[in-house]
Amino acid sequence: MADLSQIKEHAEVIGADGVHVGTVDGIDGNRIKLTKKDSGQGSHEGHHHYIDGGLVATVENGTVRLSANADVALMFEQEQDEG
């Protein structure tokens, strides 16, 4: 797992295939919290989504690159209701 302390707010998260996954809102434990604007549509809208830090391959030049393609990484997203 990459060093999550290197990940900065507003960094772009991309899959191994170069496809945009989301934008970093912050780090929550060993997970990357994505901004709500990248939260999806329908019932997923308005919730923060999280990407497990174990999927991070590298962090460089303000970009977080995952070890999985975007479509696979999105399948592993975790959702949290905003109460």
Image (tube, helix red, strand yellow):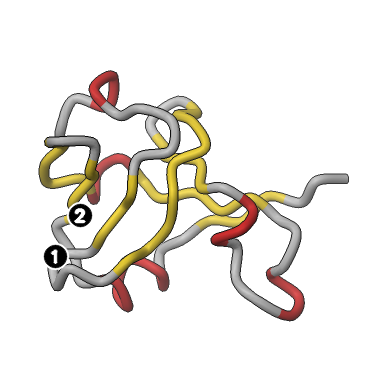
Count of number-bearing discs: 2
Quadrant where the N terminus sits is top left
Residues 72 and 20: in front is 20
* Image disc number at residue 48: none
Answer left or right for 2 relative to 64: left
Q: Nearer the viewer, residue 12 or 76?
A: 12
26 up-or-down from 47: above or below: above
Q: CA distance from mark 1 to mark 2?
A: 5 Å
Q: Position of residue 52 (x, y in %)?
A: 36, 46
Other residues around mark 2 within 10 Å, as few (<14) / some (14–19) / many (≥20): many
The vertical placement of 59 against 46, above or below, is above
Front-most of residues 24 and 31: 24
Q: Residue at x 22, y 64 (%)?
A: 15
Residue at the spot of label 2: 66
Q: The disc labelled 1 sits on which kind of residue?
A: Ala
Q: Residue furthest right?
A: 83
Q: Mark 1 or mark 2, which has the lower sequence index?
A: 1
> Residue 41's quadrant in the figure?
bottom right
Residue drawn 64% across the image and 53% down it: 36
In the drawing, does residue 40 fall left or right of residue 6?
A: right
- The answer to whether marks 1 and 2 mark residues whose Cβ atoms lie closer than 8 Å is yes
Residue appearing at x 61%, y 56% in the figure: 79
For mark 2, give the secondary structure.
Answer: strand
Identity, as a three-letter code, of the amino acid under mark 2: Leu
Image location (x, y in percent) of residue 83: 88, 45
For label 1, the SS is loop
**Is 78 located above or below residue 29 in the figure?**
below
65 left or right of 11 in image: left
Q: Which mark is residue 16?
A: 1
